[in-house]
Amino acid sequence: MAQAKYTTHHGMVDILPDEAVKWRFLEELIHREAALFNFEEIRTPVMEQTELIVRGLGQLTDIVSKEIFSFSRGEDNYVLRPELTAPVVRSYVEHRLDQRGGTQKLYYIGPMFRAERPQKGRQRQFHQFGLEIIGSSDPVADVEVIAFMIHIYRKIGITNTVLKLNSIGDPACRERYKEALKEHLRPNLEKLSDVSKVRFEKNPLRILDSKEEEDQPFIQNAPVITGYLSEASELHYSRVKELLTDLQIPFSEDPYLVRGMDYYTQTAFELISPDLGAQDALAGGGRYDLLVEEIGGQPTPAVGFAAGMERLLIACDELGIILTPEKQVDIYIVTLGERARKWGLSKLQYLREKGISATMDYSGRSMKAQMKDANREGARYALLVGENELNEGMFTLRNMAESTEKGVAFDQILNEISCSSRASS
Ligand code: AMP
């Protein structure tokens, strides 16, 4: 086959029709379940000011230092959003959503952009759905976020997951822990990776998140942050664990889990799937009690998560979970001759107005080719129309699954089709 002259960028993927139906199924499920939890949708632009992302996520994070797509135009700096927590908080502050009263429970679905090295489960344009509860410091909010995340995967049938949980405390305990971590790492500073050396002074916590081989021995026996939590942080963490236990949501504590953005405080979590291979994180999130203020709003506690949709779809493939019914159309009008084609076209319109999905051949193919096409399209019925049928006002309606045929007048068709859908539902 000839090579296409124009292709998508590396790591950016077309979602073709056979895949798009799965996406729509998934998106509809998320909208439906979010409504069940009383969350409201928010949509923000795909581009944000660079400063927002740098400030929100942290200068030294991998995302900001290596992975953002940014450019400028005139005086303005743009970045393609790499995640949505900072943009949602920007929107919350910009539009004074606090004035709507109560806690804002917002969810989103959309594309994100990170210039990572593409591989299975890692793209440069990928999609996330996520949730942000802004305005509550209560552990109940943390647990609602986690419960919604788990609920979506369970609903789809992905139950073989591990919820990793940690607390990274408030800034004061984190300072104490940072010192202890630096003490631990200092004797081997020269042996750490270059990235970790840079992080050592400015942001040592992020060393725990390093994927570099040479850092691993020093990370593995590092002190754990949970040993440095303040009383309030400890109480928050133990309440989260207690509530998760009450809801029978199993979790596994991982004291080295720090997550990839600087804005997290207190609770941090990740949902892992053993069915995913190297890129095994399905979703992640946590509390970010300081971000609203950092971005210019009033001090406002918040918690959220983001989930990768491509990885969810990969997990479905691995587990044999089929997200959509087979391709199907109620009726395929098979036409022979010009008059029949014209008639067919007008009847398509009529049927669709009645809520019956209908299609026909667009290229004047033989009857045999049209029947083959009707099969390919998953038609439940084929309606055979030629000169004779039009003259007599009687048509052959073929039930494709049962391979049976029946002579019908056109106005009987609706009845035939809806009787059979009632019988099969
Ligand atoms: P993060 O925003 O980094 O916490 O990521 C949340 C989730 O988004 C991850 O658990 C992945 O499922 C997904 N994700 C993150 N980066 C990518 C990527 N480059 N390609 C595909 N999915 C991603």
Image (cartoon, rainbow, N blue to C red):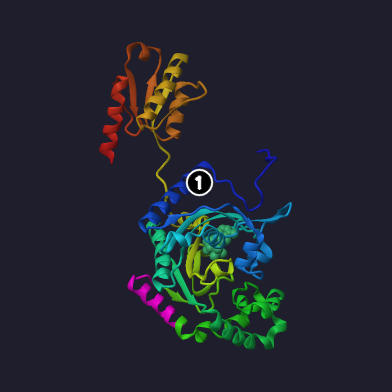
**Is 317 placed left or right of 64 in the picture?**
left
Residue, far top: 391
- Badge 1 element: helix
Residue 39 vertical position relative to residue 185 in the rendered view, above or below:
above
Q: Quadrant of residue 424?
A: top left
Residue drawn at point x = 43 percent, y = 30 percent: 374
Q: Quadrant of the N terminus?
A: top right
Q: Residue furthest front?
A: 99
Drawn side of residue 48 relative to residue 231, left or right? right
In this rendered view, identify the residue nearer to me: 358 or 366. Answer: 358
In the rendered structure, which amino acid carries the disc numbered 1?
Answer: Glu
Q: Residues within 10 Å of mark 1 (few under 14, many from 20)?
A: few
Rendered residue at 41%/68% (across/down): 141
Residue 14 lies, with reference to residue 387, above or below; the image says below
Ligand 1 visible in quadrant: bottom right
Please name whichever residue, 184 or 180, is drawn nearer the observer in this view of the structure. 180
Picture coordinates of residue 347 (x, y %)? 39, 22
Q: In the rendered image, is residue 347 in sight? A: yes
Q: Which SS does the magenta portion mostly show?
A: helix
Let me know if residue 277 appears in the view.
Answer: no
Residue 56 location in percent, x, y?
60, 66
In front here: 237 or 378?
A: 237
Magenta residues, start to end: 234-250
Q: Which residue position is annotated with label 1?
A: 19
Count of picture labels? 1
Determine whether, in the image, residue 239 is placed left or right of residue 361. left
Magenta span contains residue 240: yes
User: Residue drawn 35% across and 30% down?
Assistant: 354
Q: What residue is drawn where x is 42% and y is 32%?
A: 375
Q: Position of residue 169 (x, y in %)?
A: 51, 79
User: Where's the C terminus, which quadrant?
Assistant: top left
Residue 304, above or below 354: below
